[in-house]
Image (tube, rainbow, N blue to C red):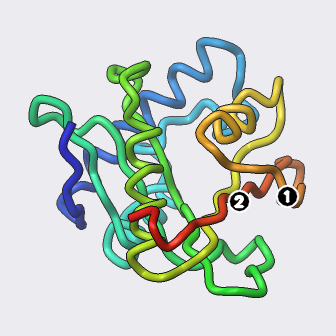
Amino acid sequence: MKIRKGGPDDVPAMLGMFDSAVAWLTEQGRTGQWGSTPFSTDAARIESVTRRASEGDLRIAEIDGAPAGSIVVGPAMPYVTPAPEPELYVQMLVIDRRFSGRGVGATLLGWAREEAARRGVGLLRVDCYAGDDGRLVRYYESVGFSRTVEFTVGEWPGQVLEMRISPGDS
């Protein structure tokens, strides 16, 4: 697996990753996270992905030259209270379902951990959908994050998780 810097040219691949995730969630009857409408047909979501690809620190994981996942890091999301210390925040993480089970998410989160250490930041945070069976929250815990604050955006239940970073983590 290769991780490379991404940019605006990666928006179509990112939208495809989100579309594959939405289709998979919908097949399971789990529409609470992102609904059932493909990202690639929703103007607001296209704009959000495009903005993050242009403004954020985007990385693309590739397997055999194909985009398999993406991550964007930066400051905390506007709906989450910033930490009282310097932090790096995972703003977006999505894996193309074709590459499920191949460690893409864990590899991208490992890159984020290393990036936080390179920047001298001692805190890496992420938030995620906390509804349904809590599976996504447990995934983040399985890769080393700990639960902190629960929140809601409208009816959408969320969970902030954090990971402490040591200087030697890079």
Q: Residue 158 in the image: state x and y as whole percent.
A: 81, 51
- Which image quarter: residue 28? top right
For this rendering, which residue is in front, 108 or 71? 108
Write down the residue under mark 1. Answer: 148
| Residue 160 position (above or below residue 98) | below
Label 1 residue SS: strand
Q: Position of residue 107 (x, y in %)?
A: 38, 42
Three-letter amino acid code at the position of disc 2: Glu
Query: Which residue was labeled with disc 2?
Result: 162
Q: Is residue 41 left or right of residue 37?
A: left
Q: Which of the image's four quarters has the C terminus? A: bottom left
Secondary structure beneath dot 2 equals: strand
Q: Which quadrant of the rendered structure holds the N terminus?
A: top left
Residue at x 43%, y 19% (from the top left corner): 101
Residue 149, relative to residue 3: is it above or below? below
Q: Position of residue 30 (x, y in %)?
A: 71, 23
Q: Nearer the viewer, residue 134 or 2?
A: 2
Q: Residue at x 63, y 71 (%)?
A: 123
